[in-house]
Image: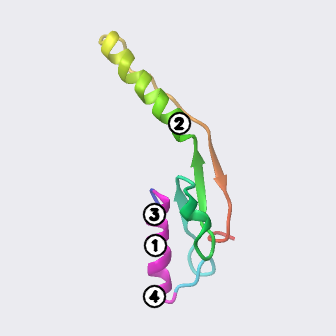
């Protein structure tokens, strides 16, 4: 799912439909919010550095304003897969 919130919603729908997690379907969230560790089963999620994303985004906007003819940069940031019960 595109976020932990959507992953939790998907988990709830699976429960309503009688689809056990992870036996019948595996669910992965994105953001590693506190919510991901409070579900049953606990949610597997992708963790990323939110501060770094914001800092680099601001830096890109500032540089684009200072140097409008400079080509946009492509930045790839590290992430970490936090494996929990929703995929085991």
How crowded pointer 2 is (Cα within 10 Å; few <14, some 14-19, many 20+) is rated as few
Sequence order check, earlier mark of 1 and 2: 1
The image shows residue 20 at horizontal and vertical percentages of: 58, 84
At x 30% / y 12%, what residue is drawn?
A: 68
> Which residue in the protein does label 4 denote?
17
Q: CA distance from mark 3 to mark 4?
A: 19 Å
Which one is closest to the eye, mark 3 or mark 4? 3
The image shows residue 81 at horizontal and vertical percentages of: 65, 52
Q: What is the secondary structure assignment of the residue under circle 1?
A: helix
Which one is closest to the eye, mark 3 or mark 1? 3
Residue 4 appears in the figure: yes
Sequence order check, earlier mark of 3 and 4: 3
Q: What is the secondary structure assignment of the residue under circle 4?
A: loop
Q: CA distance from mark 3 to mark 1?
A: 9 Å
Sequence order check, earlier mark of 2 and 3: 3
The image shows residue 55 at horizontal and vertical percentages of: 48, 29
Is there CB contact under 8 Å for labels 4 and 1?
A: no
> Which residue in the protein does label 2 denote?
51
What span is colored magenta in the figure?
3-18
Specify the label residue 5 is tagged with.
3
Q: Nearer the viewer, residue 52 or 84?
A: 52
Q: Nearer the viewer, residue 5 or 69?
A: 5
Sequence order check, earlier mark of 4 and 2: 4
- Image quadrant containing the C terminus: bottom right
Which one is closest to the eye, mark 2 or mark 3? 2
């Amino acid at each position: 799912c595109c976020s932990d919130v959507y992953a939790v919603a998907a988990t709830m729908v699976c429960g309503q439909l009688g689809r056990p997690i992870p036996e019948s379907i595996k669910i992965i969230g994105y953001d590693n919010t506190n919510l991901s560790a409070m579900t049953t089963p606990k949610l597997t999620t992708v963790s990323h550095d939110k501060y770094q994303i914001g800092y680099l985004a601001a830096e890109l906007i500032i540089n684009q304003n200072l140097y409008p003819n400079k080509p946009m940069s492509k930045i790839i940031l590290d992430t970490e897969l936090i494996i929990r019960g929703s995929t085991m």
